[in-house]
Amino acid sequence: MSAVLPPELSPRPTAASAARSGTRRWVTWLTTALAAVVLVTSTGGWVMATYYDGKISRILGLSGLSGETSGPLTILIVGSDSREGLSLQEARQLGTGTAANSSAGQRSDTMMLLHIAGDRKSATVVSLPRDSYVTIPDYTDDQGKKHSASKNKLNAAYALGGAPLLIETVKNETGLSIDHYVEVGFAGVVNMVDALGGVDVCVPSAVDDWRSGLKLDAGKSHVDGLMGLAYVRARYIDPTADIGRMQRQQRFLGSMFQEATSARVLLDPTKLNAFLGAALDSVKIDEGMSRDILLELAGEIQGLTPQDIRFLTVPLSNVNLATPVGSSVLWDEKQAQVVFDSIKNDQPLVKEKKGPTVPKAPSDINVQALNGSTVEGLASTASADLDKAGYTIATSPANADSSDVATTIIRYDPRWDTSLKTLQAAFPDATVEEVAGLGGTFQIVVGTEYVKPAGVRVAKQDNELGSHTAADDICG
């Protein structure tokens, strides 16, 4: 299923020339679901754009979409359980059944909201559990029969009324405007991963799940498309079932993103063209996403890095709610509203801090500033800087026992050596003095060459929304 650009269209740049043309590369997100986010990159031109545009399938007549193409964009990404494109052997290996023998109808196996910030400097992917207990609005089925609004699981909206009813349900539940729609089936995940040459996944213990076909050793593994699909489909290897599966899907997408934007793909014309072909062959998008719009969006977001892509699951208050339609999950209304308000207002979920990663938050570290120079008021200045940087000021600023200090000195008790690492990152040019028995308050002795503390990022930031980025360790 993966496609390679025909010889007459292939640019076939060398690694050096491709690197020089980095500013001309266009990078575009299209896909997902059981795999959901694909950043596509190419050096293209109008002929290549036309060639790739012809490979995209579009869904006509979708209602409920705003069709916006500029400013902040919110896209509903759906991974359906469509078997289209899977061979009989692949379907048997995965235990999915085939398009021919599936009698249950096509269902939405994964649902995510992708929000691309208006400044195109960040993106957020919010997983919506398929068992979310929601209100399905009234609709008319394909037989012309009218149905009143009713409570049901979220994936029932797709089964009952296809993409239009699912779009309307998500809009009502989130209060968000949905601008565009992307859909991908099982085969899409397989083909894209294979075109990348596989991706890394991670499991805490060995897995041999006959239901999904997932068989992995403990720790990190590099998997092909079929095993990657098994990894994101498996429901019974996590105690929390679908919740654990969504977390795996998010880390899988982060791994795909990292691989798709790596030099191994960008500077390899054959692999790049194969990936582009596989991605575009695999997705269906609404008719409002024209070639010109995709090219424009691709150019706007080409600077996104894995650190700029944040994943989370909509906050939940109950993951095993007994309902007339079976065990369901209930959203935490207050916390979910925080997420949706941030999207609606185009604001980041987490205010990212710049700087080196440290093991201890500044707020957990007690400090006192001491003036080791003849500069009047320098300790007070340093104390104010430390307070602004988030450190806890345990004692008022004072003079040190000497006044000939040049660069900053960090005095510490060896029992607090973990916190020391944070201060060393904040003051990279400082010297350290071990003072046994000093206690939990660090003394920051500043001198004539004083430089205020640099910003730092906490390795495991407290994040009540439970989000993470595509750059995070997949085994984290």
Image (cartoon, rainbow, N blue to C red):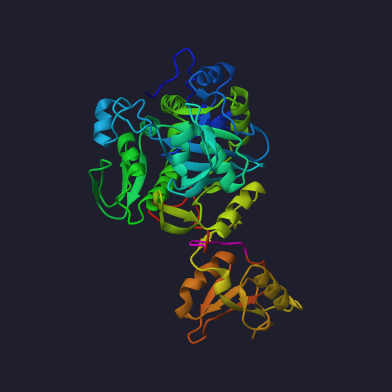
- Residue 446 locus on image (x, y percent): 65, 75
**Magenta highlight range:** 454-461
| Quadrant in the rendering for residue 3 | top left
Left or right? Give the position of 382 relative to 330. Answer: right
Q: From this viewpoint, is residue 32 visible?
A: no
| Observer-nearest of 402 and 398 | 398
Q: Residue at x 51, y 52 (%)?
A: 314
- Residue 321 locus on image (x, y percent): 42, 57
| Quadrant in the rendering for residue 356 | bottom right
Q: Give above or below for 67 relative to 426.
A: above
Q: From this viewpoint, is residue 391 visible?
A: yes
Left or right? Give the position of 234 relative to 308. Answer: left
| Observer-nearest of 175 and 42 | 175
Q: In which quadrant of the rendered image does the C terminus lie?
A: bottom left
Q: Residue at x 60, y 78 (%)?
A: 367
Numbered-mark total:
0
Please say whether residue 414 is one of the residues in the magenta stretch: no
